[in-house]
Amino acid sequence: MKALTTLVRVMAARQWHWLLAGILAGILVVAANIALMAVSGWFIASMALAGISQTSFNYMLPALAIRVLAIVRTLGRYAERLVTHEAAFRMLADLRVWLFERLIPLVPAGLEGYAAGDLSGRLRADVDRMENLYLRIIAPIATGAAVILLAPLCLGLWSSASGLALLAALSLAGIVLPLVTRSMAAEPGEEEVRLTGEVRVAVTEGLQGAEEVLLLGACDQKADKVEALYAGITRQQQRLGGINGIVSAGMTAAGGTALAVVLAIGATEVFRGQISGAELVMLLLFCAACFEGIAPLAAALQALPATNATAQRLTELAAAPHPVPEPPHPLPPVSGHGVIFHKVCFTHGAGAEVLTDFSLELPEGSRVALTGRSGAGKSSVIELLLRFRPYRGSITIGDAEVRDMASSQIAGLVSAVPQQPHLFNSSIRANILLGAPDADNSSIEATLADAGLAEWVAALPDGLETIVGVAGSAVSGGEARRIALARALLKDAPVLLLDEPTEGLDPETERTVVQRLKIRLQGKTVLLISHRPACLELAERVLRIDDGSP
């Protein structure tokens, strides 16, 4: 339960008052419902007895109490739903922020061991399932515990023996039975979570590799695998459904037994004159309503193993080791922005050595281009400079070693345009402003012109407010690359890393962009990776990498 405890602390750290308010609202609703049932039973029985005995009965006060309790129950249930769901959404938002703060330093090397479908499932579906932690587990357990502790005390004000009987029945139905069914549900609940994760991986990999699957004729094999996984999930859900049936039967039996015992005790006390007949009806309905209040307890404890398994998947991801740990103390501001690689060696996680004794010097304000065959290590040079991967040897920016710099320091000094830039599902303006959120319109316009986007944006009906789609799906590859270039230029960092910045551009647009960049990049330290002759004109030196060394 350590993983679950960790996530509870994360989710409740800032939203504890919402969590507490939701629990109190739930207790209020259950209390109003129990009181309404009890008072209604007493009122109806009293009215009947008054009619039989031809005696007067003041019905105004109990009738008012019933109306007030009904209103409190209705409004309380609305408030409870509103508060608990607001609390759940707020806690999920905090959980996502906490998780992403821990994942950002892991990209890309620290997450390469996770399949795309598995990683996506943990970030989305698993986080969403943690909504159950509060709505289906914490709140029901707190409310049920309040009923078990307080209801017998209230009943004991009229009949101590009935109060003890109710306490025993509620403990059996609300504690013993849920704990037994929780133990029964542990294995199928955890297995369902595991199989669900495998389904996400299988489906995602099948969709991502659809072309290869079709060419190899492996569609039936992939479909059979997914079908087998879904069959496994169905089996576990059937097992959980059977356990739910046991819970329902046990709860009904406990409730019925409690009513029979209270009826026997109450009948004796009525015969002795200790309580009235109307009060006996009140006690019986009071007991019946109490079991309605503890009904969610069994489902809450039954859901606990699956929720704990989900929490373990999230905490395991959050606790993944950082490929390049953050330094214990931040360095002072860096002096200068020249870049030097000295006898750098880098081995990929799979064991293949990518760079061997790689040395390269980029004096401050210089522009150097790297070319070479695919897989020679050009993109790895950029990743090492961004502090994404561990290395041997020395890489310095100004007078500071990269591995000794905090990620925030690197981000302030370096701006990069990767080979496959990511665009968010927002406007062109919002994607560009990620580089400099406070940039004014004149800076944006100048950047658009330097990135070769000005005419294209001007021709769009919505201009800069045009939505680019999920991962830039609404724009072409060349347009997405230029938006990323504009974002990097607007950031105006002293060191700029460009990986195929003009890929996908037609020759005329490429020449225009290159000519403007020659002016825009003056004074900056630029490391360029490209195989396009027009783009290589940006560089003062062109070096070829073969087998991990220039």
Image (tube, rainbow, N blue to C red):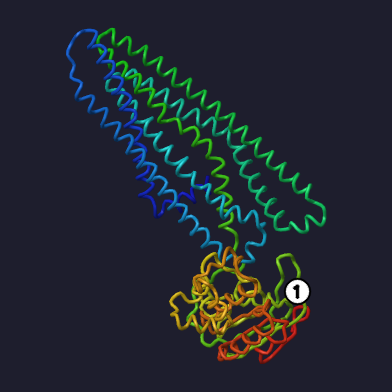
Quarter of the image holding residue 117?
bottom right
Give neighbour class at mark 1: few <14, some 14-19, many 20+ (Cα, 10 Å).
few
Toward the right, the furthest residue is: 216
Depth order, front residue of 67/474: 474
Give the x, y percent position of residue 61: 19, 25
Residue that appears at 43% across and 37% down: 140
Is 151 placed left or right of 276 in the picture? right
Give the x, y percent position of residue 526: 61, 85
Does 265 sit above or below residue 191? above
Does 7 sit above or below residue 515? above
Residue that appears at 47% across and 40% down: 136
Depth order, front residue of 384/378: 378
Q: Is residue 368 visible?
A: yes
Quarter of the image holding residue 347?
bottom right
Quarter of the image holding residue 285?
top left
Q: Is residue 361 visible?
A: no
Q: Please identify the quadrant where the C terminus is shown.
A: bottom right
Does 222 sit above or below residue 329? above
Q: Secondary structure at mark 1?
A: loop
Give the x, y percent position of residue 84: 40, 45
- Which residue is the site of mark 1? 375
Residue that appears at 23% across and 24% down: 62
Give the x, y percent position of residue 469: 57, 64
